[in-house]
Image (cartoon, grey):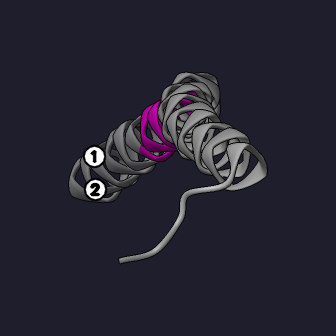
Amino acid sequence: MFNVLPESIAQAHLHDLAKAEAVRLRRVAIEAFWRGGDPAREAMLDSTKRSAQRLAYRLARHARERAAAAAATATGA
């Protein structure tokens, strides 16, 4: 049978503490990552929404201009 030295017990305890701390830090890092991702995702969605609105306005303006041109052509103006 092996004799367990006090240094090995202390080292095993430190190892267990280090593992527990690593698990805690990993959990904190993952939470921070996802919290940090939310503002970036929101900014991307805002930019996409603005682009879609600008496109919709341009298409509506183009449709109005085509309708006006067609009406002018039909009336002979």
Q: Which residue is mark 2?
A: 70
Q: Which residues are magenta?
A: 45-55
Residue at position x 36%, y 54% in the image: 66
Q: CA distance from mark 2 to mark 1?
A: 5 Å
- From the image, give the main secondary structure of the stretch colored magenta: helix
Note whether 33 is above or below 63 in the view shown. Answer: above
Relative to 59, 16 lies left or right: right
- Is residue 47 shown to the viewer in this render? no
Q: Nearer the viewer, residue 37 or 31?
A: 31
Question: Could you tell me residue 69's position as x and y percent?
Answer: 40, 53
Question: Could you tell me residue 35's position as x and y percent?
Answer: 54, 22
Note whether 15 is above or below 53 in the view shown. Answer: below
Looking at the rendered structure, the kind of residue marked 1 is Ala
Residue at position x 51%, y 34% in the image: 20
Question: Could you tell me residue 9's position as x and y percent?
Answer: 61, 45
Give the quarter of the figure containing the N terminus.
bottom left
Residue at position x 56%, y 30% in the image: 50
Q: Which residue is mark 1?
A: 67
Q: Secondary structure at mark 2?
A: helix
Q: Nearer the viewer, residue 64 or 40?
A: 40
Is 50 included in the stretch rendered in magenta?
Answer: yes
Q: Residues within 10 Å of mark 2 (few under 14, many from 20)?
A: few
Looking at the rendered structure, the kind of residue marked 2 is Ala
Tag 2 and tag 1, C-beta contact below 8 Å: yes
